[in-house]
Image: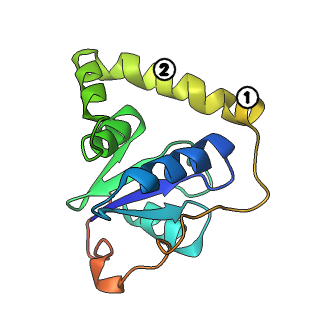
Amino acid sequence: MTTIIYDGYCNLCSFAVQFIAKRDKANQFYFVASASEEGERLLRLYGYDPQEITTIVVIENSEAYERSEAIFRIVKHIPRWKWLSIFQIFPRTFLDKIYDFIAKIRYKVFGKRESCLLPPNRSKMDPTELPKLNHKEK
């Protein structure tokens, strides 16, 4: 199971979650809003400050990935979108600068929601499938 921690107030992020959920036929993604209690717990567990988070975080195999690396971790699981992994030929610093630019303007361009929008029937998970609490902090 791959956990995606996202900004549930961001329209772009909410659209992306809906887009991913619709294409996730194997139900391999679990979505958590970063502002939720569970999202804040997971962020702290992996060494992020929930009040300062400005990136998507993907947890896969007990490792946390952010920014462009998180995006590549997601697309590798989505049929017909795996081809985007070819952009990994570019330096991560370059890709992260593009990510940071989009993250910086996302509210201005795409707007901000008043509440989080979660995919139907995907917001609850068996607690045994969540990342373990004994994971060492960054």
Q: Amino acid at mark 1?
A: Val
**Above or below 28: residue 58:** above
Kindly state the secondary structure of the residue where label 2 is placed: helix
Would you call the spot at circle 2 few (<14 residues within 10 Å), some (14-19), or many (20 or more)?
A: some
Cα–Cα span, label 2 and label 1:
15 Å
* Foreground of the two, 123 or 34: 123
The reply to whether residue 93 is visible in this rendering is yes
* Residue under the image location 56 percent in, 58 percent down: 50
Kindly state the secondary structure of the residue where label 1 is placed: helix
In the rendered structure, find residue 109 and report the number of the disc placed on it: 1
Give residue 87's position: percent from left, percent from top. 29, 20
What is the quadrant of the N terminus in the image?
A: bottom left
Q: How is the image coloured?
A: rainbow
Give residue 21's position: percent from left, percent from top. 44, 56
Specify which label sits upstream in the sequence, 2 or 1.
2
In the rendered structure, find residue 60 and report the number of the disc placed on it: none
Q: Quadrant of residue 96?
A: top left
Give residue 99's position: percent from left, percent from top. 49, 27
* Residue under the image location 71 percent in, 35 percent down: 110
Q: Residue furthest right?
A: 114
In the rendered structure, find residue 98 and report the number of the disc placed on it: 2
Q: Quadrant of residue 88?
A: top left
